Amino acid sequence: MCLLLALTMVLRFGVAPAMAQGNVSFLRDAETEELLRDYIAPIYRAAGVGGSRINVYLVNDRSFNAFVADGRRVFVNVGALMESDTPNQIIGVLAHETGHMAGGHLARLHEQMAGAQAIMVLSMLLAAGAIAAGGGQAGQAVLLGGQQLASRSLLRYQRGEEQAADRAGMTYLAATHQSGRGMIDVFRKFADQDLFGSQYADPYARSHPAPRDRIDSLEHLAKQSPYYDNKDAPELQYRHDLMRAKLSGYLNAPGTVLRDYPNSDRSVPAQYARTVMMMRQGKFRDALSGVDRLISQSASYAYFHELKGDILVQAGRPAEAIGPYRRALELKPNEGLLRASYAKAMVTANDPSMLPNAIAELRKALGQEPDHTEGWMQLAIAYGRTGQRADADLASAQAAVVRGDNDTAKVLAERAKRQFKPGSPGWLRADDIVKFKPKKN
């Protein structure tokens, strides 16, 4: 991917809670996020980066793109996931992007951009002097030359960093006993897309190495590894196939889903895609039959139970969804999104006896997923129904903070603050929101 694009997105959106303010939208899915964390964790260990908790962000974009912003945040376009045939292809891209992060390329790109800007400013001053002295054409030539020099200097730097990230990525793949074929497959795809436009392109006006040269270099590096012929583990490939099928069922038109996963395909991933598609179409009886077949084949797979809960909630039967969500949570007790869905079903069931447990579960879920807007909204509803108005206002303020609606957050926090005892934990948190000033980019 283009390093400049990654930098632009990071600078624009800053930390995760502010991301929803931009033009980029994000999706949440526990199954996909868990799989991507499993993909990146060994790479991070090999690179010596990252923390104990890796946050995965699914970008709702159909282009093939992925990048890492720091040791905690991984951004992957759903288009990359849906187009990738194997885990190794995604892992290869993530290994390359980890090479950028571990090499400090984003930080150094700031310095290079500052240097390029200085060259342009100097050329503008020299051009202005030449023009003032009566040399209009000479001044224009100086200005144009300065712009070209600055641009080529920055692009040359980027090409070097891309090559360094390629080498680093291959090193991480070898260290984790994985093949470099996936990275090569992805860059070959990009090369095919870029071939016509690059035939007559100036090689010095590129931010990335020439596609064919890059692939040749990658293949040379990859074939030096004793793991070049290694395949993805069957279990990992199966999870990858399930993830792609699920995304197709949720994001593609029914005709596309049935083209890719026809009724004649009785594989588990194909059944998964069609079941999700039927839920989206409101065919809840067929969707429930489909998910029950999936559970009968893989009763220990948590996300089939989650899907059954989702179908029942959408069918207006939240009380019946509690059991499937509980089972999913038993199988994946550390997944905050599953816990939030379980608690939401209890809130939506509108049974007052369930509310204390729903509040407890939501607080646990938000401890794991503090940026989950829906979780904060459900907590506010639960508090409101139990008469805990101050806590309800504070939870609503938290939801507004995550949405990036700071004005609404301050109003709600101020109202909550007046209801809490001064100095209490709730009062202090509300006071923090009232006094919060977002950083200006």
Image (cartoon, grey):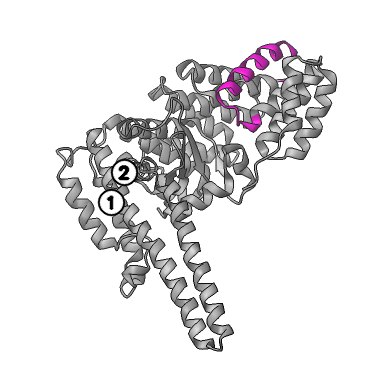
Q: Residue at x 65, y 32 (%)?
A: 373
Residue identifier under label 2: 92
Place of residue 222 in the rendered image (x, y in percent of width and height, measured from the top left):
20, 46
Place of residue 291 in the rendered image (x, y in percent of width and height, measured from the top left):
48, 29
Q: Amino acid at mark 2?
A: Gly
Whether 351 is among the magenta residues is yes
Place of residue 258 in the rendered image (x, y in percent of width and height, measured from the top left):
44, 47
Chief secondary structure of the magenta portion: helix
Whether 409 is among the magenta residues is no
Snapshot quadrant of residue 158: bottom left
Place of residue 246 in the rendered image (x, y in percent of width and height, measured from the top left):
46, 38
Mark 2 vs 1, N-terminal side: 2
Label ID, residue 308:
none
Instruction: Measure the alpha-carbon separation of dots 2 and 1.
Output: 9 Å
Mark in the foreground, 2 or 1: 2
Residue identifier under label 1: 185
Write down the region rendered in magenta: 350-374
Q: Is residue 224 above or below residue 341?
A: below
Residues at discs 2 and 1 in contact (Cβ within 8 Å): yes
Snapshot quadrant of residue 46: top left
Residue 333 in view in this figure: yes
Snapshot quadrant of residue 354: top right
- In this rendered view, identify the residue nearer to me: 176 or 154: 154
Q: Residue at x 45, y 53 (%)?
A: 111
Residue 315 in view in this figure: no
Secondary structure at badge 1 equals helix
- Number of marks in the rendered image: 2
Q: Amino acid at mark 1?
A: Asp
Q: Is residue 398 above or below residue 439?
A: above
